[in-house]
Image (tube, rainbow, N blue to C red):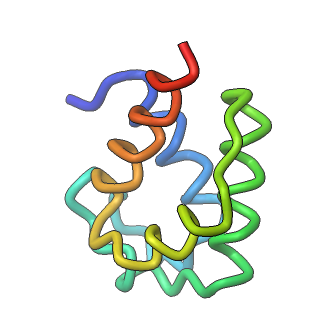
Amino acid sequence: MADQLSQEIIEKIKAHADMDGGELTPETELTALGIHSLELTEIIFDIEEAYGIEIEMNTVEAWSNLKNVGDMVAAVRDLISAKA
């Protein structure tokens, strides 16, 4: 079972994902969600606002290499921890 941060990020991704009723889990491949650069940018803005973090542009470029939802959750968790 995913923790609260995972669930919150999954909900933000769901708002932008092209899903056919399937379940979104940490193992879900980002490429399978039809998320393009504009949607990724919107997701990043949502995450920044929700958690009071700043994702620098070089981080966004690195995020393009993320494979699944769990990778994105881990990246956000790292940024939140670094802020504390």
Report the side of 19 relative to 69 (left or right): right
Left or right of 21 in this view: 36:
right
Residue 84, horizontal then vertical, whole percent: 54, 12
Residue at 69% across / 75% down in the picture? Answer: 39
Q: Which picture quadrant has residue 29?
A: bottom left
Would you place residue 49 above or below residue 64 in this image? above
Residue 25 visible in the snapshot:
no
Q: Which of 7 and 75 lies nearest the eye of the viewer?
A: 75
Image vertical order of residue 63 relative to residue 25, above or below: below
Res 39 seen here:
yes
**Who's the residue at 68% across and 34% down the image?**
53
Residue 25 image point, x, y percent: 29, 52
Picture quadrant where residue 57 is located: bottom right
Quadrant where the image shows the N terminus: top left
Q: Name the spot of residue 35 as percent of width and height, x first.
A: 55, 81
Q: Is residue 8 above or below residue 36?
A: above
On the image, the x and y values in percent for residue 83 come to 57, 22
Count of numbered marks = 0
- Is 3 drawn above or below residue 56 in the view shown? above
Query: Which residue is painted at 39% across and 44% down in the image?
Result: 73
- Name the residue at 54% across, 62% down: 59
